[in-house]
Amino acid sequence: MAEVRSGVGQFSVTGCEFSATGTGFLIAPDLVVTAAHVVDDASAISIAFGGEPSVEGVVLGFNELADLALVRINRPVAGHQLQFQEAQPPIGTDVAALGFPLGEPLTLTRGIVSGLDREVNFGSGRIGNMIQTDAAINPGNSGGPLLDEQGFVTGIISAGTVGAEGMSYAVAAPRAAEAVAEWQLRGVVRAPVTCGNAPAPNSGFFPMTISSNHDQATNIGQALLLHGQGINRGAYSAAFKQFTPELGASFGGEAEWSKGLGSSYWTKLDVVNVTGTGDSLVANVSLRTRQDAAHGVAGQTCSDWRIAYTVVWDGAAWLIAGTALPHGNPQACV
């Protein structure tokens, strides 16, 4: 399983009013399979594989009623390319789910196939041909692979059943393989959702790197990435929801906060180090922004910031609780 892990990535998805996370896996150096509900209504998609800088994704294939999607990334990734099992596994087959549940690092949970050909309705219509498993599945696992002991994909994780332990579901691999084979022949991507007057040019993608080895650095980086993606795409509602209610109120609400951004957008983020313990941590980051001279410190059109973000765990995600400039105002980019 160690080799397989390099091909499993964490999704950070921004919509106009929401942010979401999920999992996906490589089937080619530039193609990632995930669940449709992970990327539905996406304005921006970033995916992180291991400690490498995040990559941008665009939706190449999408089927809501099968809960399947194929995402093309903007540069090849050297991770393991997973393969689909050709037939459904027998009931009782040992399986393992790989993903990023509840803000945890890449996690493996084991179980068995406990049912086949299930039909499930998660709210958008009935999805048939589902595999049922008792492997533990939580929010963040969606889109990840359900693997057999040989490392082949037997299913694409869709969701667990709320209030029912030991009942989770995955789209059967043969159905996914058929859809993916068809989508790979297409060259037209699904247009991202437009949220308004986005300040960043083009897609607004920016790379994120993690220099800190703190066990929560990646998850905190993801929270900041979602915040920046929202700013870049003009999805200010989504970006504002990355603040704690108290910090949001101190800005005078979403409209006042977003008005103060002017033309600013993010172009590069690095989580340098993370300090503290428990549910309140401080992330020291290096951030580069661009903006019109009228909105930049001392007329800067490109600024390099060193920001200390205080972040708190609310039980489901890291939220921004405060900011500080320990090194003073930003420097003009060199």
Image: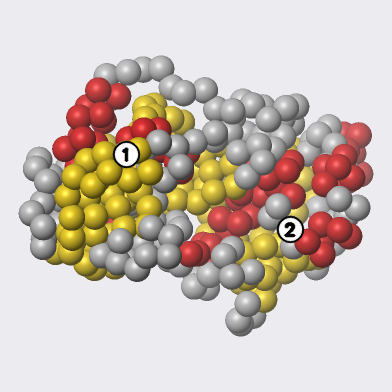
Mark closer to the chain start, 1 or 2: 1
Q: Depth check: give the residue in front, 193 or 295.
A: 193
Q: Quadrant of the N terminus?
A: bottom left
Give the position of the C terminus as an image quadrant. Answer: top right
Q: Is residue 157 left or right of residue 174?
A: right
Q: Residue at x 62, y 34 (%)?
A: 204
Q: Is residue 37 above or below residue 58?
A: below
Q: Mark 1: few, some, or many residues within 10 Å (few <14, many ≥20)?
A: some
Q: Is residue 325 visible?
A: no
Exactly how many numbered labels are in the figure? 2
Counting from the top left corner in percent of width and height, residue 160 is at 37, 57
Residue placed most toward the observer, 49 or 139: 139
Q: Up-down: is 10 above or below 128?
A: below
Circle 1 residue: 127
Residue 190 horizontal side relative to residue 83, left or right: right
Secondary structure, mark 1, is strand
Q: What residue does disc 2 label?
A: 243
Residue 132, quarter of the rendered image: bottom left
> Which dot, 1 or 2, sits closer to the camera?
1
Query: Could you tell me the amino acid type at mark 1?
Result: Ile
The label on residue 267 is none
Q: Secondary structure at mark 2?
A: loop
| Distance of label 1 from label 2 (alpha carbons) | 35 Å
Residue at image location 35% in from the left, 68% down from the top: 165
Q: Residue at x 30, y 24 (%)?
A: 183
User: Where residue 89 appears, x then y in whole percent?
Assistant: 10, 51
| Mark 2 Cα-neighbour bin, 10 Å: few <14, some 14–19, many ≥20 | many
Query: Is the C-beta separation of discs 1 and 2 under 8 Å?
Result: no
Residue 329 vs residue 51, the one in the foreground: 51
- Residue drawn at (46%, 23%) of the image: 190
Q: Amino acid at mark 2?
A: Phe
